[in-house]
Amino acid sequence: MIRVILFLLFALPTIAAAQASLSAQQVEQINALFTKFDRDGSPGYALGVVKDGTLVYARGFGRADLDNNVPITPRTSFHLASLSKQFTAAAVALLILDGKLSFDTPVVKYFPKLRTFGADIEIRHLIYFTSGLPEYTSLPRASGDPWFSFYYFTTDEAIAATLRAGKLKFPPGTQWDYSNVNYMMLAKIVEQVSGASLSEFLATRLFAPLEMRDSQLNDDSTLVVTNRATGYADRSDPSIRKELQSVGIVVRPGAGFLRLQRISPHYGGSGVFSTVEDLAKWDANFYSNKLAGPQFTQLMLRREQFRHDKDNDALGLVFGEFDGRQMLWFSGADLDSSTYMVRLPEEHLTVICLSNMPRGHAEDKARAVLSIVLHPQGDTKASQ
């Protein structure tokens, strides 16, 4: 607790100074979105607004750890869930720049069992969710346990379940189907090609160069994650209790929150823990090209046309539109978090919203904040 207090004493003046870049009205409107959670006894959010490479707003609302009443701050570490995919994709991009992988590299080279599927799956098919591989959660576990993060399972086990299926849902490149197993396979390919674990690769090739000191890939559920935000959900929500009970977890009814723990260390499609402050550094790289030069950024933003209509995916990112402006975004959700990060590249403006509530609706919150920043006079209507 002393360390938390010292951090707050150190950080608050810096954050307050940065917020001077937003008007008092904007800050007040943003804060009002999170008032309900800005108290003891409630989980909440970490929020960041990045403008022209500077974190102009960074604040926490609520508590990261209800057991010990630890407040959420801009350095609280959240499980990013599917926001992790852009980091798995970044590892692939770095290996492409190293000349060790290419978009047309056959995946069967690393997963020989794919020969039984009778189709040519390439790295590009995994990156853009068009491989046709069935998602592991749609298949039975060998153990009979649920595919649920309360139950321990690994990336290898998930991939093995998909490989046992023996057939694709559709020929590669003909349809789009969001599936985590695509990025799990990419993670294992990075490991085979680099000779290092994905956690080690990201630590040395990405997090260290960008000085993202509070970021890591959690591939071992026994590891300590400094300043970790524990997941919580509303205990009185019958749908929450029903969902948990459907996978064999008995929940006592009543008021307050129930604690949610991610026991399974699967990664590739998820597994990265990071903070608002570190994600602001990652965002800045898309303009500075500090990491591996402009070629890396170009790869991260690369789009490709397949034999289906969806062509707005990049590498772990999605192109879209907000209020008539081009945006890049991705969202994440797991039993311990709800996350969203949206960038308006022409405005050099990004909003980062991380919650330790799986039903925290981080996307809705982030879009509301983005509207406030774009329309300081209160006109917060935005195109979707």
Image (cartoon, helix red, strand yellow):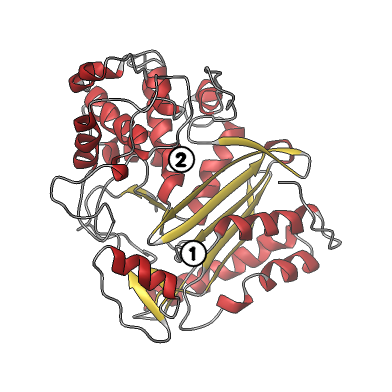
Q: Sequence-wise, which precedes: disc 2 or disc 1?
A: 2
Q: Nearer the viewer, residue 141 or 302?
A: 141
User: Residue 243: image x %, image y %?
Assistant: 36, 65
Q: What residue type is labelled 2?
A: Leu
| Residue drawn at 42 percent across, 83 percent down | 256
Residue 179 falls in which quadrant of the image?
top left
Q: Label for residue 359? A: 1
Residue 137 falls in which quadrant of the image?
top left
Q: Nearer the viewer, mark 2 or mark 1?
A: 1
In screen coordinates, is 111 left or right of 82? Answer: left
- The reply to whether residue 209 is visible in this rendering is no
Q: Which amino acid does label 1 sit on?
A: Arg
| Residue drawn at 21 percent across, 27 percent down | 195
Quick one: label 1, few (<14), some, or many (20+) residues within 10 Å? some
Q: Is 338 drawn above or below residue 288 in the view shown?
A: below
- Residue at the extreme bottom of the image, as rendered: 254
- The reply to whether residue 330 is visible in this rendering is yes
Q: In which quarter of the image is the N terminus?
A: bottom left
**Marks 2 and 1, how far apart at CA:** 31 Å
User: Residue 211: image x %, image y %?
Assistant: 44, 44
User: Residue 190: image x %, image y %?
Assistant: 29, 28
Q: Is 264 drawn above or below residue 288 in the view shown?
A: below
User: Residue 322: image x %, image y %?
Assistant: 72, 44
* Secondary structure under the numbered disc 2 in the rendered image: loop
Quick one: label 2, few (<14), some, or many (20+) residues within 10 Å? some
| Residue drawn at 68 percent across, 44 percent down | 52
Q: Is 81 drawn above or below residue 290 in the view shown?
A: below
User: Badge 2 is on which residue?
Assistant: 210
